[in-house]
Structures are given as C-alpha cells and as structure tokens.
Image (cartoon, helix red, strand yellow):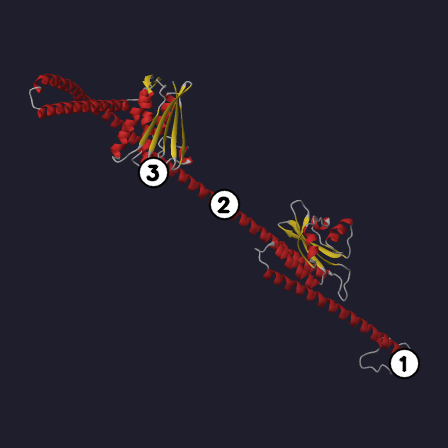
Amino acid sequence: MTMRRRDIEAGDDPFAHVDDVAELRRMAAYFRNLADDNGARLLKAEASASRNRQELEQKTRGFSLLSRLSYEVSATEEPAFVAGIVTGHLNGMLNMNRSVVLLRNGDGSFGVLGAAGYGETERQGLAGLRLHPPKAVARERRVISTLAPSTQMDRAVFDGLAIRYFMAVPVIADGQVKAVIVTGRMRERLPFLPPLNSADLETVSAISGFFGAYLARHSLILRDRERINDVERLVVERTAEIERQRGLLDDSLHQLRETQQQLVLREKLASLGQLMAGVAHEIRNPLNFINNFSELSSELAVEIEEMMEPVLGHVGVEAHDALIDTFAMLRSNLERIATHGRRADNIVNKMLQHSRGDSYVAEGCDLNALLTESIDFALASMRSKDPLFEVAVFQDFDPALGMVTLAPQEISRVFVNLLSNGFYALSQRRAQASADYSPSMVVSTRRKNHMVEVRLRDNGVGMSAQIKEHIFTPFFSTKPTGEGTGLGLSLSYDIIVNGLGGAIEVDSRENEFCEFVICLPV
C-alpha cells in the first residue's frame, strides 16, 4: 500500500493501515526525506535572515558612520582633512585594505586628496600622481563595482593606487563630478572576511553623497570668503585712496595758504620797496646838504687856518699849540663827516637800485667793486638785526678782471641775497657751535675764457642733499615762518640763468660749508 501525505488526516493513526514490514520501512524513509526537506528549508530561512541581519547591521553602521562624519566634520574644514577622515572610516567599517579620495584638477585629471592604509613612503609616492579614472565614473557618473580591473585604463589607475579589487564611486557636487572615492583590497577575499556586496556599495554611495554635499558647502564658503576678502580689499583700497586724496588736499591747502602768505608778504615787500625808495629820496636831499656843507666847511677851515697864521706868531706857546690841535681836530672831523656822508650816499643809491623793477640793462662795471659794496650792504643789514654779529670776510679778487659788461643792478641783488643767506647760516652755526668756532666768508672772482666765475663760500650750517634739491624752488625756505619768503634764491636763479644767460651751482655739506658758484658771460 502506498501512503501519500494528503491521505493522513489530523488525528488519524499513521500506522493504522500498515499491513507489513516493507510498508513500514517505506513510511520511515518518507518521513526521513520530509525531515531533511524541512531542515533544508529551515537552513535557507536562517541564512536569509542572517544576510538580512548583516545588511541591516551594515546599513546601521553606514548611518552611524554618516552621523559620526557629520559630527566630526564641519563645512569649514579643509578638504584634505575631511578626505583623511572618510578614508579612515571606510577602511575600518568595510574591512578594506586601502581607501582613496581622488579630487578633480583643473585639467580634468585627478589627484590624491586623502588616503588610508598606506605607509609614509607610499603616501609620498601618491602625492604626485595624476590619474584618469574610468570614464564611467568620471564622465557618465556611474558606480564601478568589480572584483578586478576590466580595462587597461582601469589597471593603470588602480596599479598606481596599489588596489586590485575595488569599488569606485563618483562624488557629485554642483552638478559635476568633483571627486571619486575608491575603496578596495589587495586580494579578492581576506581570511574570514566576506566579499564586497550591495550593502557595501550603498554605504560607499551614501558617503560619496555626504562628501559631495560637503564639497558643495565648502565651495560656497570659499566663494563667500573670496567675496568678503574682495569687499575688504576694496574697502582697504578705497580707504587708502580716500586717505591719499585727503593728504593731497591737505598738502594743496597747506601750499595754498603758504602761497597766499608769500604773495601777501611779497606785496608787503613791494610796498616796502616803494617806501624805501621814497625814504631814500627824502634822505638824499639832507644828505646832499651834509656832504656839500662838509666840503665847504673843510675849505673854510683851511682858509681860517691860513688867515690865522700871522696871528699865531703873537700868541703864547700853549695857545699856539691849542689852536693847531683844534684846527687839526676840526679838519679830521670834517673828513670823517665827508667819508660817512659818501658812505650814506652809496647806501641810499643801493636802496634805490634794489627798489627798482627788473631791467637787465647791461653796462660796464667793476665787478670786484660791486662785490665789495654788496658785502658792505649785506653785512650792515645783518648787523642791524644782530649787532653782535662778527665774521671774517676774505676777498680773493682777480686783479686782472677789469671792467665787465653786466647788468649791475640785477647782479648786485643776487650777490646781496647770497651773502645775506651766508651770513644767516654763519649766525645759526655760531649759536650752536663751541667757543673756538670762527665764522668766515670767502668771496673770490676769476676770469675764465669768456666767463667770469664768482665763488661765495661760508663755513656755516650748510644744507642736506634733500634741501639742496629744492633751494631754487619758489616759496621753498628753511627759515622760520616770518623770516624768509622762499623767493630770494629762486629770483637769483631767474636773474642769473634766464636774465643774464649764466649758470649757478651749489655745493654743501651739513655743519661744514656751503659754496655758491656763479658763472657769468662777459
């Protein structure tokens, strides 16, 4: 009798219809097969449950890894630092030998941004790699999962990374493949480790999505930083430009005020020149009377002395000597009055010459005598300001110079100006120097071919190279405010160079000397 499973109902005795031992044996074999079949199904169910449990654990570890990465990494971290963290976690979670993050360069190649599982020497070799991952990853943005490189390009890339069995996942940021995450092993299976599976692929894909989001945020932060830096740089540049413009305006305002003061002072000097001319004319009349009457008085004194000669023989010796001494003293006084009268007349003439306008009228003159008069005039002007001023003036004039054709009024202005400046420099150094300092001025003349050279050298305070560059600039002055107009040397330069066609040079060293050299055509 053949027994089928459907013939046995619940509650029936399975052995009720057994007639012989052979049938019993067939039934025992049947149940053994049934038990084996159920056991196999149970094993399959347990294996499926184990795989599901492993996949769930892998996904849980993946989510845990993403949470840990989100906690450890901020958008402001450097990409290389983040790549190092990502590769290290990949090796630890997926039991990989090596993991690498490749970052796209500007030329389309990829370089190693971060790596884990390499020694120090291998890391140095990775630093200079320029790789081109499979086109499916870099261009078509597909995930490559394989147990071995499939093309020659794949082999070249992963030989360079020293990885044989791998997964390569693109990192998308801003709609472009910015990087590639590669993780793998040197052998297909390590001892007691399962092969790469879809859960591993999902984990790496999730991490690539995290890294892509990080790159996008980091790129935004860098752009924001660049904008902020550009704005800050623009603010600094604008501020500097404003400060520069403000400085220029301040300088212009200062120069304008100085120019205004100098113009006012020049007008005052012009008015003073007119006043000086008027005073000189007024002085000339009584001075002429003094000079004339001093000459007449001298003649009268001589006549009286001659008329008294007959009488002197009839007086005593003492009266005779007294009269002789009186007449001698009278003649001496009259001669001194005449001498100082002539000197005063020369001063008045100079005052009139300096009060006139520019004429540049050439005429014959004795340049040596003109220099002597200029020295006397400048020295008298200096002593009027400083009665205790003393200076040794050495005149080294060329005796063969003779008469030269010049504009005496204008050249006299130049000499007086330069001599006055020299005496001022001497007084300044005298106030600073020791007691053994001796102020001196050397004035010399020489004829050289068709030129006359005049040198004026003093041992005063001198001047620096910076000041020497600007001394002929209008309104430039080293004197305190109110003492100098800044026009004297510029006018002297204009007279010598532009008016008379000559040249003027200066040589000086601070606290040693200052020398002006004037060359005049004759």
Q: Residue at x 53, y 47 (%)?
A: 227
Three-letter residue code for mark 1: Leu
Disc assigned to residue 233: 2
- First along the sequence among labels 3 and 2: 2
Q: Which residue is mark 1?
A: 24
Mark 2: few, some, or many residues within 10 Å (few <14, many ≥20)?
few
Classify residue 423 as left or right of residue 348: right
Residue 394 in picture, x, y percent from top left: 33, 28
Q: Which residue is mark 3?
A: 437
What is the residue that sits farthest to the front in this orientation?
A: 317
Which is more toward the observer, 41 or 265? 265
Mark 2 → mark 1, Cα distance in angstroms:
100 Å
Residue 117 in picture, x, y percent from top left: 70, 59
Judging from the image, what secondary structure is the residue with disc 1 in?
helix
Q: Can I make out residue 209 in this image?
A: yes
Classify residue 103 as left or right of residue 406: right
Residue 319 in picture, x, y percent from top left: 8, 25
Closer to us: mark 2 or mark 1? 2
Mark 1: few, some, or many residues within 10 Å (few <14, many ≥20)?
some
Mark 3: few, some, or many residues within 10 Å (few <14, many ≥20)?
few
Q: Residue at x 51, y 48 (%)?
A: 228
- Disc 2 vs disc 1: Cβ atoms closer than 8 Å? no
Q: Can I make out residue 282 in this image?
A: no
Residue 369 in picture, x, y percent from top left: 31, 22
Q: Residue at x 32, y 38 (%)?
A: 430
Closer to us: mark 3 or mark 2? 3
Which is more toward the observer, 303 or 18? 303
Closer to us: mark 3 or mark 1? 3
Judging from the image, what secondary structure is the residue with disc 3 in?
loop
Three-letter residue code for mark 3: Tyr
